[in-house]
């Protein structure tokens, strides 16, 4: 399965971070167009895709496409900001569920992020290669959300390895962990999903627990 086929989906949320037990909302036509656009951006690059390409792939032409999005830039914003928000919300919820047990909190964070990374390889590829295409304001908003998410990991790591890890060192480890978990756009399909998840969780926990 290609990145184009594995385009943007709402990331897996932690238990307790959902919508009050309600069923997920039905995907709209706008969601479908965004999914197609993200897949195209991830495989061809932002500059390699035109609005006409997206419209053709989605079966939408002319004004109908612009009814949903002002342009490619708006699609990037629509893909990346909600993902960053949901990662922060989901990460906080996982930590809250673990109460005062930093080891359990770390395991929950790793599980949460691995599931996100496996479900959203195209979004990760888009973020890695195309974030700088955004205007300053949304780019700064995404960076801020990311920093807040990283600090959730930093707090968990320093609590787990109390006295043996500075905040700066924990930040280095957190970013290294993201490098492991966010490798999903580059993984082939020769290993099934469950085993990939198991390997990513084990490698990440091994790197973080010391």
Image (cartoon, rainbow, N blue to C red):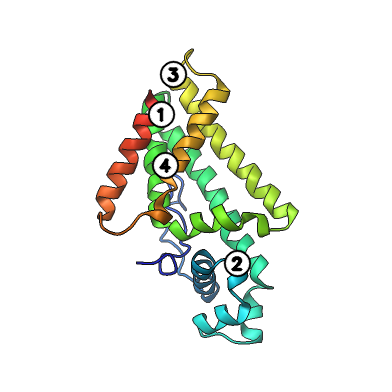
Residue 110 drawn above or below residue 25: above
Is 74 in front, or is 101? 74
Question: CA gap, disc 4 to disc 1?
Answer: 11 Å
Question: CA gap, disc 4 to disc 3?
Answer: 20 Å
Residue 103 drawn above or below residue 90: above
Residue 66 drawn above or below residue 180: below
Residue topped by disc 2: 46
Image mark for residue 124: none
Count of labels shown? 4
Say which of marks 1 and 3 sits in front.
1
Is the residue under label 1 in contact with that under label 4 (CB below 8 Å)? no
Residue topped by disc 3: 161
Residue topped by disc 4: 180
Secondary structure at numbered mark 4: helix
Q: Position of residue 29 (x, y in %)?
A: 52, 76
What residue appears at the point 64 percent right and 45 percent down from the top-left corner? 143
Residue topped by disc 1: 208
Looking at marks 1 and 2 on the same chain, the residue that comes earlier in the sequence is marked by 2
Question: CA gap, disc 1 to disc 3?
Answer: 10 Å
**On the picture, is 100 further left or further right than 172?**
left
Looking at marks 1 and 3 on the same chain, the residue that comes earlier in the sequence is marked by 3
Residue neighbourhood size for the residue with mark 3, other residues' Cα within 10 Å, grouped as few (<14), some (14–19), many (≥20): some
Say which quadrant the N terminus sits in. bottom left
Question: CA gap, disc 3 to disc 2?
Answer: 41 Å
Is 2 in front, or is 59? 2
Say which of marks 1 and 2 sits in front.
2
Secondary structure at numbered mark 2: helix
What residue appears at the point 42 percent right and 49 percent down from the top-left corner? 183
Q: Position of residue 28 (x, y in %)?
A: 51, 73
């Amino acid at each position: 399965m290609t990145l184009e086929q594995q385009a943007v989906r709402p990331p897996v949320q932690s238990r307790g971070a959902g919508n009050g037990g309600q069923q997920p909302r039905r995907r709209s036509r706008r969601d479908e167009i965004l999914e197609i656009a993200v897949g195209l951006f991830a495989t061809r690059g932002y500059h390699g895709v035109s609005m006409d390409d997206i419209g053709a792939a989605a079966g939408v032409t002319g004004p109908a496409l612009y009814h949903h999005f002002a342009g490619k830039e708006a699609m990037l914003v629509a893909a990346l900001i909600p993902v960053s928000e949901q990662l922060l919300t989901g990460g906080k919820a996982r930590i809250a569920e673990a109460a005062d047990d930093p080891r359990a909190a770390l395991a929950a964070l790793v599980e949460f992020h691995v599931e996100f990374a496996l479900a959203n390889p195209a979004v990760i590829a888009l973020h890695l290669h195309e974030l700088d295409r955004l205007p300053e304001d949304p780019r700064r908003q995404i960076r801020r959300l990311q920093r807040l998410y990283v600090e959730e990991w930093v707090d968990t790591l320093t609590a787990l390895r109390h006295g043996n890890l500075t905040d700066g060192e924990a930040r280095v480890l957190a970013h290294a962990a993201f490098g492991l978990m966010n490798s999903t756009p580059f993984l082939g399909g020769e290993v099934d999903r469950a085993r990939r998840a198991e390997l990513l969780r084990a490698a990440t926990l091994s790197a973080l627990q010391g």
